[in-house]
Image (spheres, grey):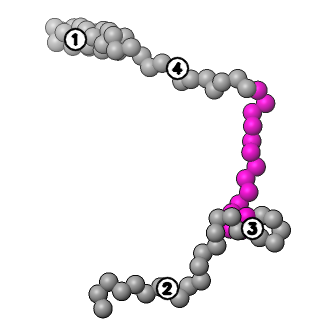
Amino acid sequence: MVGRFEPSALPPRPKPSARAADGRASGAFQMESIRPDTTDPIPLRPAPNQFGTIMLRFVGMLAVAIAILAFVYSR
């Protein structure tokens, strides 16, 4: 028959609320919570360079490179 569903022979999975005999959740690891000593906020990363600063450096280095090449060519 087309579309007939056959259940698997495996036993059903335990429910998330199932507990082991010692009170721990079965199959789950209990993780210890680590808290900081102070409640100061986490500092943010420094702001990246402004676009104008990057362009100024590029133009400056380009001018230096052109000056060096012009000096070498004139010799």
- Helix, strand or loop for disc 2: loop
Amino acid carrying mark 1 in the image: Ile
Which residue position holds label 1? 66
Cα separation between marks 2 and 4 = 57 Å
Q: Select label 3 or label 4 by which is in front.
A: 3
Which residue position holds label 2? 8
Residue 41 % position (x, y): 66, 24
Which residue position holds label 4? 46
Residue 42 % position (x, y): 63, 26
Q: Quadrant of the C terminus?
A: top left
Residue 38 % position (x, y): 76, 26
User: Is 56 a magenta residue?
Assistant: no
User: Tag 4 or tag 3, which sits nearer the N-term?
Assistant: 3
Q: Residues within 10 Å of mark 1 (few under 14, many from 20)?
A: few
Q: Nearer the viewer, residue 54 or 29?
A: 29
User: Tag 2 or tag 3, which sits nearer the N-term?
Assistant: 2
User: Tag 1 or tag 2, which sits nearer the N-term?
Assistant: 2
Amino acid carrying mark 3 in the image: Arg
User: Tag 4 or tag 2, which sits nearer the N-term?
Assistant: 2
- Helix, strand or loop for disc 4: loop
Q: Residue at x 52, y 20 (%)?
A: 46
Cα separation between marks 3 and 4 = 47 Å
Quarter of the rendering containing residue 39: top right
Q: Select label 1 or label 3 by which is in front.
A: 3
User: Is 28 a magenta residue?
Assistant: yes
Residue 35 % position (x, y): 75, 37
Cα separation between marks 3 and 2 = 25 Å
Which residue position holds label 3? 19
> On the picture, is 7 further left or further right than 1?
right
Q: Select label 2 or label 1 by which is in front.
A: 2
